[in-house]
Image (cartoon, rainbow, N blue to C red):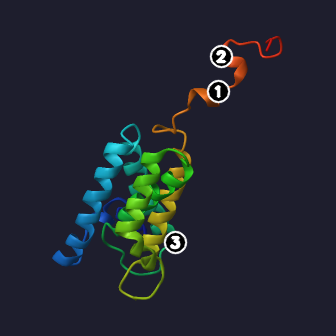
Amino acid sequence: FPRSEEQVHGILTFPLVHDDWEHVLSNTIPLFVLMALLRYHYSTVWIRVSLLNWVLSGIWLWLGGRAALHIGASGFVYGLASFLFFSGLLRWGERRSMAISLVVVFLYGGLIWGLFPFLREVSWEGHLFGGLSGILLAWTYRKQPPQRPVYEWELDEKDDGVDIENYAM
């Protein structure tokens, strides 16, 4: 419950509480797929991204959510999906990251509808804040591996040991 001092522990526990088995399953499958993509492609930052996404989305939901109970791991799922998608955009030219971005759009592009307040019983704020935390983390870790490879012809000519100014043709 947002902004309630008695419920401040919900910042860390809201992704663990679900309404029913259908709710658990609807979060578990995307969570497994997105965590696998994150773990194997962004192996140097996956733990930091996961933990920061969990905490940031929880804090922002606690601060900005409407006065209602917010449960489920979907905010965390939205954070992972937006991290993977925007990391691919920010690493333009790094083919694997771009491919993962396309896979996320193909598999989970429909998540965009969860950002809008269509259903009263759905925490669209949790989705929104999870997505925003993923965008922030993609920007924060944009220079971490994997990076686009730099090819030999892209290097500065002065770095290759050839003095271009005194080069006779």
Alpha carbon distance from label 2 to label 1: 8 Å
Cβ atoms at labels 2 and 1 below 8 Å apart: yes
Residue positioned 36% across, 44% down in the render: 41
* Residue wearing tag 2: 160
Q: Is residue 69 above or below residue 169?
A: below
In front here: 122 or 35? 35
In-image side of 18 versus 2 (left or right)? left
* Residue wearing tag 3: 64
Quarter assignment of residue 155:
top right
Residue positioned 48% across, 71% down in the render: 128
Dot placed on the residue nearer the N-terminal end, 1 or 3: 3
Residue 76 is at least partly visible in this image: yes
Q: Residue furthest right?
A: 165
Alpha carbon distance from label 1 to label 3: 47 Å
- Per the rendering, the mark at residue 155 is 1
Q: Is residue 125 above or below residue 42?
A: below
Give the residue type at disc 3.
Answer: Gly
